[in-house]
Image (tube, rainbow, N blue to C red):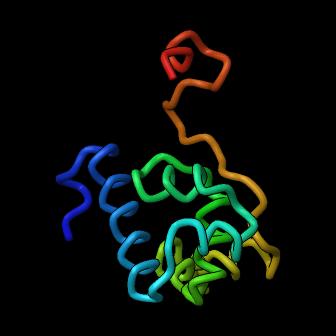
Amino acid sequence: MDFYSMTDEAVLTDLGQRFRALRLRKNLTQDELARRSAMSVTAIKSLESGRTRLATAIAVLRELGQLEALDQFIPEPAVSPMQVAKLGGKKRQRASRRHGQPSPESPASSEW
């Protein structure tokens, strides 16, 4: 699926439909899933309509036995061997500002 061609709302709607399909594959009602995941039925309905909190999604994935899907959702970033060598074996803690870019305090960045 080409998520880049979709609006954010369309992506959320698609994810909600996927959660619903997972629930139905496990033959669970919304009420059963809510009880088993310690969520409200309203939270499950919101999840399936694409309006949810990340904590709700994680709890439901755990209950549906699909928690490993988080590795595909946001894979752990690989560290470049060149970057490790550059940093002397230390792990990078923050991003650096690029030359020619406005600082976060500048008026140009206040548009965010």
Look at the image and tell me in which quarter the N terminus lies: bottom left
Q: Looking at the picture, does residue 73 appear above or below residue 97?
A: below
Q: Looking at the picture, does residue 51 appear above or below residue 86?
A: above
- Is residue 80 visible in the rendered image? The answer is no
The answer to whether residue 8 is left or right of residue 90 is: left
Q: Looking at the picture, does residue 90 appear above or below residue 102?
A: below
Q: Which of 44 and 96 is in front in this view?
A: 44
Q: Nearer the viewer, residue 21 or 27?
A: 27
Residue at the top extreme?
107
Residue at 62% across / 25% down in the picture? 103
Residue at 78% across / 60% down in the picture? 93
Q: Which of 38 and 67 is in front in this view?
A: 38
Q: Nearer the viewer, residue 77 or 22?
A: 22
Residue at 45% across / 86% down in the picture? 27
The answer to whether residue 90 is left or right of residue 86 is: right
Q: Residue 106 appears at what percent x and percent y?
A: 61, 15
- Label count reads 0
Q: Residue 101 appears at what percent x and percent y?
A: 51, 31
- Is residue 58 visible in the rendered image? The answer is yes
- The quarter holding residue 77 reads bottom right
- The quarter holding residue 89 reads bottom right
Q: Residue 37 appears at what percent x and percent y?
A: 70, 72
Q: Residue 56 appears at what percent x and percent y?
A: 64, 60
